[in-house]
Image (spheres, rainbow, N blue to C red):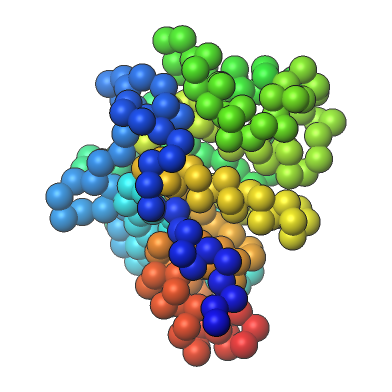
Amino acid sequence: MSTNPYQDDRGNKDRSITAEPPAHLGDPTETTGPATAAEGRPFLMGEAMTGGYRGGADILHDCTIAVDPGEIAVIVGPNGAGKSTAMKAIFGMLDLHGGRVVLDGQDISHLSPQDRVARGMGFVPQTANIFTSMTVEENLEMGAFIRRDDFRGTMEQVYDLFPILRDKRRQAAGELSGGQRQQVAVGRALMTQPKVLMLDEPTAGVSPIVMDELFDRIIEIARSGLPVLMVEQNARQALEIADRGYVLVQGRNAYTGTGAELLADPEVRRSFLGG
């Protein structure tokens, strides 16, 4: 009998939190709306990426990461493997000397992070991802800074996804628990009406119970059709909910497959999952 609690409940089975147009994103605009993969190509792909931070040596070496609508793609690997660097490369935060980043069929390698947000990337960094002196609601409002429409419906969807934030909407975000802060950070990213959600270690520093709750919400987000790409330190738990998994070692793709395939691979289990 399987011990995987998500085996029959992974994040691409239905559209339980959105309708057409996606309710969690609000009304479509020219730069945002439901994710649809170009025929034969992933919706978001960092392809053969080689590069590093300005003035430094290359950290990524011919690294490829991709995710499609409704999928959860997870990047795992040992410390220093380049996991967060790969995420930042896709978001435009470091120099690529080779490869490219493609979103919805368009090469966006030349765009700044700000322009990538306008094109539909929602990015949640691991640290410094909320405004601690602002209330929960003010944080969410800041997430809608690129919007020119009425974003109250999107905010209600965020509150439906994270009910505790509705209760604490007038409270300073810096007074919240670690897990609640992460909910604020994810909710703020959703306020931009993203086409893809990128999470850098969303469960870092939270308890196992809170981690499970966050993973449940990530599954709900993916069910809506929104692609989710995340770096995660809790590799085994992350691969249990992953449609795609990427194991990086020294900035290179070491193993790629579905979450189930990687969990079943003896070498992956022995080298990265503790046996």
The answer to whether residue 56 shows anywhere in this view is no
Q: Quadrant of residue 115?
A: top left
Asked if residue 32 lies left or right of residue 193, the reply is left
Residue at 56 percent across and 21 percent down: it is 155
The spot of residue 84 in percent (x, y) is 55, 56
Left or right of 30? Residue 165 is right
Position of residue 257 relative to residue 106, above or below, is: below
Residue 215 in the image, given as x and y percentages of width and height: 59, 53
The quadrant holding residue 26 is top left
Q: Which of 179 and 88 is in front in this view?
A: 179
In the picture, measured across the screen, residue 169 lies left or right of residue 266, that is right
Task: Give percent across and percent down for residue 79.
Answer: 63, 69
Foreground pick, 274 / 60: 274
Q: Which residue is drawn at 41% across and 33% down?
A: 18
Instruction: State the residue in front, 16 or 41.
Output: 16
Q: Residue at x 66, y 50 (%)?
A: 213
Q: Which residue is drawn at 33% across and 47% down?
A: 69
Residue 133 rendering spot, x and y as whole percentages:
79, 22
Residue closest to the far left: 39
The N terminus - image quarter? bottom right
Q: Quadrant of residue 149?
A: top left
In the rendered image, is residue 186 in sight?
yes
Position of residue 69 in the picture relative to residue 132 (left or right): left
Query: Foreground residue, 195 or 56?
Result: 195
> Residue pushed farthest front?
1
